[in-house]
Amino acid sequence: MTMRKAPAPTSARRAAVLLATTGIAVALPAAAGAATPTPSPGAATISKAGTSFLTAAGISPGQPVRVGASVGDYLYWSFTAAAGDTHHVAATVSLPAAASRKGDSTWTVEVFDGLRRRQACVAGAQTPVASKSAATVELDCELRQVRSWAEPWSGDPLPGTYYVRLSGIELPEQELGLPIEVSLLVGVESDGDTRPEGGDLKEPLVPAVDPGKVLVDDPTASTPDPAAAGDDEGWFDWVRWPSLSSRWYWTIGGGILAAVAGVVGFALTRPRQRVS
């Protein structure tokens, strides 16, 4: 029995396969890319940044940021997001002169929501590596669309305050303290659907910005007077019983056992009197 060989593909078929493969390879990076945000006309440039979540400098989408810093600094900004918005954070770090650099460096831009939960980037170079000879390094992070509500266990983005943190995560120790310049811009796109899932968030995730200050829901409400409470709670009210925990039970049980052991030990070791 003679076996036949499969016919060789024609040149046209080869060209079609090559074109399809190349088209797929080109289409994938294009789909993964994110549009660069543009500043809003007439927006004032912000020239400051915070050093923590509590001191983050407030910015608006479309408002450019240009600030001087040092290698090793953690820079924080905050902005407000509404349901239906999709934000894109773009940053450029102007690095020190190549003569003063000692090696490659890795930079990162991170975004956190009002509960300090780190939000995932769906596109962009979030953690690029800058070579020793590079003059600048560009960072990008496109966030997911802000939802109007989410399950308590999920980490979906919700309306409220968001924080941007830019820092270097792998830096040569000799470069710490060298001057840099950071340019940052937050862009926003909205499809107009503020309630994409048909739900509604009760209150935006905006943390308290005055640490140590007592927050009162209704300043005009008077504090209830303990003496004005009724007497229907029983004659036992004047006793303030502590909430007993397992430590109390172990302490009481240990004291009882120690007392019993002392009595038994004294009974066994006391001298017996002789009867004459």
Image (cartoon, rainbow, N blue to C red):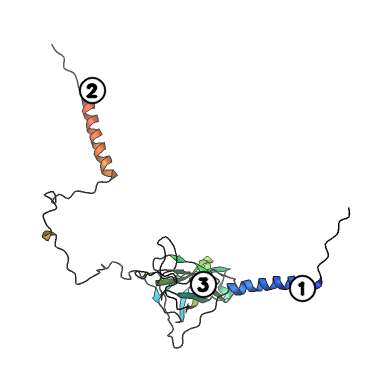
Spatial distance from mark 1 to mark 3, Cα to Cα? Answer: 37 Å
- Tag 1: Cα neighbours inside 10 Å, few (<14), some, or many (≥20)? few
Instruction: Using the image as rendered, state which of residue 239 and residue 201 is in the foreground.
Output: 201
Instruction: Using the image as rendered, state which of residue 65 and residue 269 is in the foreground.
Output: 65
**Which residue type does callout 3 highlight?**
Cys
Helix, strand or loop at mark 3: strand
On residue 141, which mark appears? 3
**Quadrant in the picture for residue 105:** bottom right
The answer to whether the residue labelled 3 contacts the one labelled 2, judged by CB atoms less than 8 Å apart, is: no
Q: Where is residue 6 in the image (x, y as percent from the top left)?
A: 82, 62
What is the magenta range? 139-145
Q: Where is residue 143 in the image (x, y as percent from the top left)?
A: 49, 71
- Tag 3: Cα neighbours inside 10 Å, few (<14), some, or many (≥20)? many
Seen as rendered, the residue at the extreme front is 1
- State the residue at coordinates (40%, 68%): 149
**Which residue type does callout 1 highlight?**
Ala
Of the numbered discs 1 and 2, the one sitting upstream in the chain is 1
- Relative to residue 173, is residue 78 drawn left or right? left
**Disc 1 target residue:** 15
Q: Position of residue 269 (x, y in %)?
A: 23, 23
For the C terminus, give its image quadrant.
Answer: top left
